[in-house]
Image: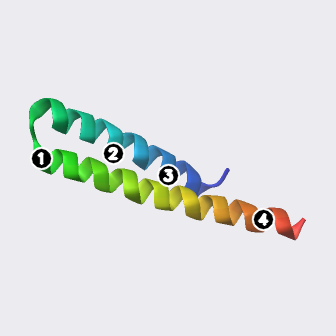
Amino acid sequence: MNKDKIEGVTQQGVGAIKDAAGKVLGNDKLRAEGLADKVLGSAKEAIGDLKDAGDHKKV
């Protein structure tokens, strides 16, 4: 587990909360922000996975 992976998972969680709040409140902008956060969080998590895989190859 590295910093990128932790940040990615956290950002996905924040995005899910924004998306849900946007749905409940009928706020399309908040939903869009939430969806964007989830996508960016997934990308950060994937970068973290790649870094972890690279670290394992060094051993």
How much space separates mark 1 and mark 4, taking CA atoms? 41 Å
Per the image, the residue denoted by label 2 is: 15
Judged from the image, the secondary structure of the residue bearing numbered disc 1 is helix
Q: Which mark sits nearer the N-terminus, 4 or 2? A: 2
Q: Which residue is drawn at 57% across and 60% down?
A: 46
Judged from the image, the secondary structure of the residue bearing numbered disc 4 is helix
Which numbered tag is attached to residue 7?
3
Q: In this view, does 52 lie above or below 18?
A: below
Which numbered tag is attached to residue 45?
none
Kind of residue at badge 1: Asp
Q: Which of marks 3 and 2 is in front?
A: 2
Residue 3: name its quadrant: bottom right
Residue 13 location (% of width, % of height): 41, 40
Front-most of residues 31 and 44: 31
Kind of residue at badge 2: Gly
Residue 20: name its quadrant: top left
Which numbered tag is attached to residue 55?
4
Q: Nearer the viewer, mark 1 or mark 2?
A: 1
Q: Nearer the viewer, mark 3 or mark 1?
A: 1
